[in-house]
Image (spheres, rainbow, N blue to C red):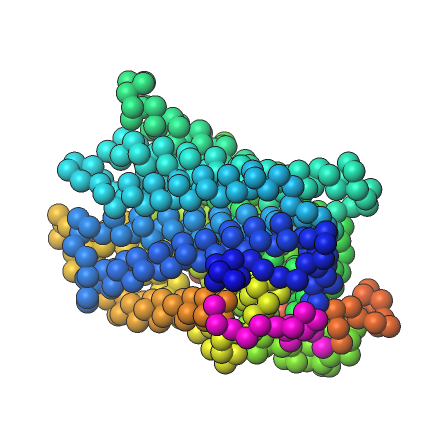
Amino acid sequence: MNPVTALFANDYDEDGFRNCSVTGLDIHRSAENHVKLFGLTAVIAMVVGGLFAISVALTRWELIGLIPEDGYYRHLSMHAWNLLIFWMVFMEIAILYVGGPMVLGRRLPITSVAKAGWVTMVVGAVGINWSIWTVDGGQVAPLLTAYVPLDVPAAFYASAVLFLVGATVAALPFFVAIWKEKRLGSSETLPLVAFGAFVTSIIAVMAILGGIAAFSYALIWKLEIINSINAGIYRQLYWIIGHGSQQINLLAMITVWYFLTHVVGGAVVVSEKVSRSAFILYLFFINLGAAHHLMVDPGLSAGWRIFNTSYAFYGAAFASMIHAFAIPAGIEAGRRQRGLGGGLFGWLTSAPWKNPVFSSTVFSIILFGFVGGITGVLMGQLQLNMTWHNTFATVGHFHGTVAVGTTLAFIGLVFFVIKTMFRRDYLSGTLASLVPYFYASAMGIATLMMMYIGILYGVPRRTSSVVRNIPGTDFSLSAAQPLFMIFGVFAVLAITAGALFVLVSVGSILFGRQLDRDDDAGLLPDGGLRADGGESIHAVDMRGTFALCLIFMATFVALYALNWFLLTRLWSIGA
């Protein structure tokens, strides 16, 4: 059998279905093969973005200063597009196929459309990378924002539109699967994972339409179909996708949390109604969080700023708080039902921490909450935004949400797919177990350094040479140099951890031992997937989760107070 074809082979019945020995789901080859296709493409994008992470990190670590100032944007743009967009979106299409047809036990409908979407996305991604890498003359490498009227190649805007259209096309089979389930299948409510994926898809459509509008507007201006462009309107359109893409990440990540904590950690859903309500709150409020990127734009009224950074923003934050309680509570309840661990935290200390699927997922929950989530609420406040805006702290927040939050969850999902869909054992169980710990600790520290550098010293986010001086001024930021040293070391370690993940995952797919048809691959929680004969969920003691929530809230309050104190000191700079 051809090695490539072998990657998509499994034992299916005459109707194309097989029963998963881990989840118990009936999976059709059409859904499984497209999950593999999009997932493998995502890992390739991660490799490309990771290669440019090396040059970006070694440039911002000015002791090395790898790239001249005039080449920094090119590398930063390649890094941002491949890791913030391509790695994420290809994985998110795969997640839609898992949360839709796989969980529902259906075929993936209109597979030709899914393939067309994949091809369009790949062509768009290649076009964006080519446009960034080949800019010359007076043109500038288009950073993720690509603000007009910067002289950005028309091919870039066209490729961006193409990629977003491709993502929309690739999502259509998921919508058809949901429609068939509700109109032609069961009248019951969608399973929670499928419901989460459905809400994710709606948020994605909202974000993608904004992106198509923004980049199409810039494209027709670049092609001189229109003579002028309103930079303020473009910025507002752009941030529908610029921030909305990260909200897709958020919802996809939370959906993965519910799925993987159940399958490998034995979690239960404490209250489906409450968890569903949190997803619905996101529908109305989460995309309004993009306002924190526009706080200094002159065209927006004070009322608009206040509404978006208070009332609307609180709706999204409340939804996140619900999930922050529901998911660890589900883990605690499920494990206590199985009699696994007593005391305050025995349910957690007895968990399968050597399983990289579990550890990746739980580290994602913890780091996203304490690093990405809290900082998102802080910088989303109208007043506190002034201490964060366009500083290196904003980059730290991005990495707190995307790098240590979403990426860790997706790493766990890739490890899960290797065993359950590719049916391969890990090339090295020890290295696979090491990846989440290595990556979470290294990237977590690098992220904190970015935040400290930005908040405490006001180091700008888009200029690579700042420690000795800001070009064109006598203003010195040399006091930040020790933190840059720590950042540089741990950024390199985080990149090394990412490379180890790619090595283990690709090596396992190509050379890992073939698992038997009925082998549960060592993924199932102690006591099986379902707690048998345990007490009612609402009779289970969840004091451990309550204690964790108190710790989280205390951290939140302390950081909130600290940032308000720093705001009062803002005007003392230079005095």
Q: Residue furthest front?
A: 1
State whether residue 87 is above or below residue 160. below
457 or 29, which lies in front? Answer: 29
Magenta-colored span: 510-526
Q: Is residue 378 visible?
A: no
Q: Main secondary structure of the magenta part?
A: loop
State whether residue 494 is above or below residue 113. below
- Which corner quadrant of the image does residue 135 belong to? top left
State whether residue 494 is above or below residue 382. below
Q: Position of residue 366 (x, y in %)?
A: 55, 66
Q: Residue at x 54, y 56 (%)?
A: 36
- Which corner quadrant of the image does residue 465 belong to? bottom left
In the image: residue 340, left or right of residue 313: right
Q: Position of residue 368 (x, y in %)?
A: 52, 60
Q: Position of residue 192 (x, y in %)?
A: 71, 52
In the image: residue 389, left or right of residue 471: right
Counting labels gives: 0
In the image: residue 534, left or right of residue 353: right
509 or 237, which lies in front? Answer: 509
State whether residue 450 is above or below residue 237. below
Q: Residue at x 64, y 56 (%)?
A: 323
159 or 196, which lies in front? Answer: 159
Q: Residue at x 43, y 48 (%)?
A: 85
